Amino acid sequence: MSREYDLILVMTTFRRATVYLPIIKELSSRFRIGLYIFDIPEKVKIKTLQTDKIFLDLCCQLGAEIVRDTPVKARLSIIPQWPYTPEQISTMKDSIQCGHKFALMGLMWGNLHLDKMRQLAIDKYLIIDKDIYKFRLEKRKHEREYNINLQNLVETGLPFLRYPVFEDFGIDYLIAHPSPLSLPEAKDKYNYLKCLLKLLASIDRTEKIILKPHNGDERYDYLLNKRMVNCLMKRGVFLFDGVIFWCAKTLLCLLNSMRWLALCKMKNILYDVLIVLYYKKLLKKVVLLKSITPYHNFSLEIFLPHAKKGLITGRSNSIWHALLLKKAVYNCVDKNTIKENKEKMNYYSMQYFEVPYCRGKLIFDEKYFGIIRDEVRTRDMIRFLDEVLSFKKVLKAQTKEMHFMEP
């Protein structure tokens, strides 16, 4: 016998499901919500195994029910954009019976993987920002082959400011390390930390500065070389940090002057040494988010509304999230010093919403808030879903209140 729900939320990884938290928190008192769990590839699962578990536990605390390998019926299901296997698509077709299916689109994902979801007969596509969606399709013309009726696109914005999941953490500045795409080489990580420390030196010591490493892998901070951490983070080594730093910096300057390709490996080793030493300095100036909350590895956008004075980061999608909330952004990565992969979408997205390199100065021009339309800020995803589930809206209608918009 099928279990019956008002809303089924399909779950892959927490990184694709952060909006589920405010949805569950706000709607579970009036609607029965089920989380339908799908296994993800082992190479993906191992990176965030504990965080996914914590995320599911919190979803249950907020009022959702876990569903595994059980037929369900629902009025509405939300299915995140994901490279589903044919077996998973078949399972969703056979096991999830619902009146309407909404696809939850990623910020910069465009129509990626939607060909794999074609058999699901999606009714509506929930896009965060129609301008970003259109921009992606301009750069990825092959994705236009997946044709979506414009009336089936629903611009939702993001709900984290209007519907906070957590109480205020009292954050003044939030440091969010950018993704590895922003810092492809060891010297890029070194330059990022160097700029970051210079910027922090200009912030009053009474300000609460919180550090959030990138959440792509919960096992370690990708900025750091594990071997160097094991060597330089040992008790007593700090007594020699100054000497080690001077030696590494002097030798690196010497090797850079030689410009021999054969010395690249040695240079990277020296950069890794300096990165760990810079990181040790950084830890003396900040508070780790994980010391404040067990949910520290959740996606940035859930914490960003609490950052009163701004976001400190690199060239990453976190810039868009800060601009959406009208938070000052300090970009500590100089695009002129890195070698970007022009095949990656990060290269193009930075053309859309990048703010200038801050050069270690606490200066931000509010004109960059204009990159995002105010209409995106006023969208109310929770209200929209509430009204759909309450049958207050007819899904085929195209009205301003439903936030249907042509890209």
Image: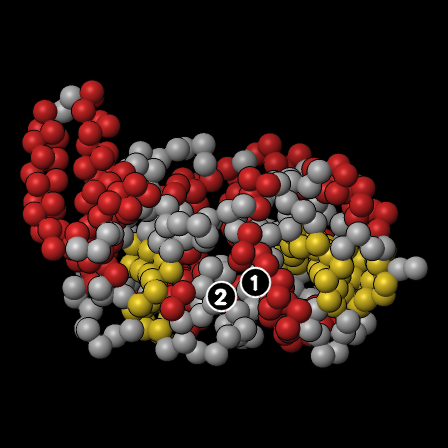
Q: Is residue 354 visible?
A: no
> In terms of depth relative to the viewer, which is nearer, 7 or 159?
7
Quickly name the residue at label 2: 295
Residue type indicated by callout 2: Tyr
Residue at the (47%, 67%) spot, across then down: 294
Residue 225 point in image, percent of width and height: 31, 42
Residue at the (76%, 50%) spot, across then down: 122
Residue at the (20%, 29%) spot, across then down: 266
Label 2 near label 1: C-beta < 8 Å?
yes
Residue 394 relative to residue 242: left or right: right
Callout 2 secondary element: loop
Looking at the picture, the colour scheme in use is secondary structure
1 or 2: tag closer to the N-terminus? 1
Residue at the (70%, 45%) spot, across then down: 148
The answer to whether residue 113 is above or below residue 301 is: above
Q: Which mark is residue 54?
A: 1
Q: Which mark is residue 375?
A: none
Residue 344 point in image, percent of width and height: 45, 36
Residue 76 point in image, percent of width and height: 78, 62
How much space separates mark 1 and mark 2, taking CA atoms?
7 Å
Q: Is residue 385 visible?
A: yes
Residue 336 point in image, percent of width and height: 25, 39
Label 2 crowding class (10 Å Cα cut-off): few <14, some 14-19, many 20+? some
Residue 107 relative to residue 10: left or right: left
> In terms of depth relative to the viewer, which is nearer, 124 or 91?
91
Callout 1 secondary element: helix
